[in-house]
């Protein structure tokens, strides 16, 4: 069995070519839920869904988000209504009181659906309606995720890191009048395109959250692969849950760097790494992952680490690229 920690697009890209290296029937993917949001009453789990859609053959591979060839009629109509009613566009964070009322799992991440700030396709929305309905019927997020995986014929076991609420909250400098002092990661990334300065990142709720039993069991069984995801907001929420971090310290772990020395492949990882107190580089990734036993680095990455390193071309544009990186991961597991 092999366990993959997944968030953003890095690990899903790795998984897209890993089938010939790591048998899907023996693979578990533990997905980040720190950037989940409740939007218009629906629980949206972006990192969970990217894995489900990729493994189920549905993913929009141009965006690495949502379902390919989806329509957006509901999303477009929401904006038309808001415009006609003179309502300001989103993101429209619900009040502090509303954040702790209602569905427990959605705490600290509730947004109004008025002029929704995240574009949800119509088929994509049906997934969120189903998820939310099953949660309201009393099922856990793990149970719901596995039900959705069955619906899409997903060959790997996909489980959330926790069935409890953990929210990635970005704090901006207090003297920045343009942005709120704190915002959910999706507001920071989707609505503001990572423009705000970042003072720190909080994983709200992590101190009280338990790992999902499936996630904890998979990490304990291992070995574990940390894909080239953002170390702060994709993997950081998992590390903020004590029992998951402790299990990783006891596991055999190989991590793929999302950097080539100090150049990141995509996303806001560099800014967030600096805010979290890590050097925005491969060296900083190693600092963030003291539990990792070995690393896969790019051929052009000359970073000298204190742990075994396997090098390959880590850029992944297609499944052949992903298979090459997956084979490097397998090689790294052989040397630890």
Image (cartoon, helix red, strand yellow):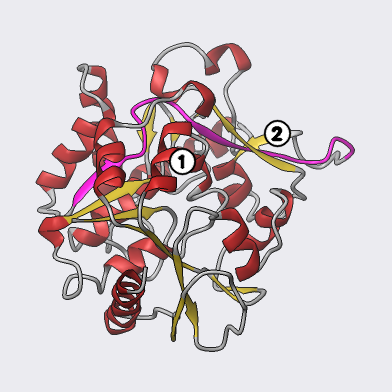
Q: Is residue 135 left or right of residue 267?
A: left
Q: Give the label on residue 74, or none.
A: none
* Rendered position, 188 above or below 100: below
Q: How many marks?
A: 2
160 magenta-colored:
yes
Q: Residue 28 appears at what percent x and percent y? A: 23, 51
- Return the residue nearer the eye: 310 or 256: 310
Secondary-structure class at tag 2: strand
Q: Which of the 4 image quadrants contains residue 209?
A: top left
Q: How many residues crowd mark 2 within 10 Å: few (<14), some (14–19), many (20+)?
A: some
Q: Residue 83 appears at what percent x and percent y? A: 56, 39
Q: Is residue 29 left or right of residue 9?
A: left
- Return the residue nearer the eye: 187 or 40: 187
Which residue is disc 1 drawn over?
245
- Return the residue nearer the eye: 42 or 316: 316
Rounded to the nearest angstrom, the CA distance separating label 1 from label 2 is 25 Å
Range of residues picked out in magenta: 157-175
Secondary-structure class at tag 1: helix
* Rendered position, 39 above or below 319: above
Which residue is disc 2 drawn over?
182
131 magenta-colored:
no
* Any part of residue 83 in sight: yes
Q: Residue 45 appears at what percent x and percent y? A: 37, 41
Q: Dots 1 and 2: beta carbons under 8 Å?
A: no
């Amino acid at each position: 069995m092999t366990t993959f920690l997944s968030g953003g697009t890095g690990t899903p890209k790795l998984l897209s070519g890993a089938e010939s290296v790591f048998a899907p029937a023996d693979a578990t993917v533990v997905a980040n839920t720190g950037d989940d949001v409740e939007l218009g009453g629906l629980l949206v789990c972006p990192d969970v869904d990217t894995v489900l859609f990729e493994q189920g053959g549905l993913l929009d591979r141009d965006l690495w988000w949502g379902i390919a060839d989806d329509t957006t009629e509901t999303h477009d109509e929401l904006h038309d209504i808001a415009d006609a009613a003179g309502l300001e566009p989103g993101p429209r964070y619900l009040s502090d009181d509303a954040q702790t009322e209602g569905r427990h799992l959605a705490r600290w991440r509730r947004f109004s659906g008025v002029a929704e700030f995240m574009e949800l396709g119509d088929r994509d929305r049906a997934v969120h309606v189903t998820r939310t309905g099953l949660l309201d019927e009393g099922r856990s997020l793990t149970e719901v995720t596995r039900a959705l995986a069955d619906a899409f014929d997903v060959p790997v076991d996909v489980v959330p890191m926790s069935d409890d609420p953990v929210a990635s909250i970005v704090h901006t400098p207090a003297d920045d009048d343009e942005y709120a002092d704190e915002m959910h990661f999706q507001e920071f990334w989707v609505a503001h395109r990572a423009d705000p300065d970042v003072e720190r990142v909080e994983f709200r709720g992590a101190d009280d959250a338990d790992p999902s039993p499936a996630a904890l069991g998979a990490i304990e069984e291992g070995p574990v692969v940390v894909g080239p995801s953002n170390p702060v907001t994709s993997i950081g929420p998992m590390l903020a849950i004590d029992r998951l971090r402790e299990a990783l310290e006891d596991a055999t772990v190989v991590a793929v760097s999302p950097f080539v020395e100090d150049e990141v492949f995509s996303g806001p990882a560099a800014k967030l790494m600096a805010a979290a107190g890590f050097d925005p580089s491969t060296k900083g990734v190693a600092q963030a992952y003291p539990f990792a036993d070995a690393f896969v680095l790019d051929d052009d990455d000359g970073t000298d680490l204190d742990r075994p390193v396997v090098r390959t071309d880590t850029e992944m544009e297609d499944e052949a690229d992903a298979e090459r990186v997956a084979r490097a991961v397998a090689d790294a597991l052989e040397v630890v």
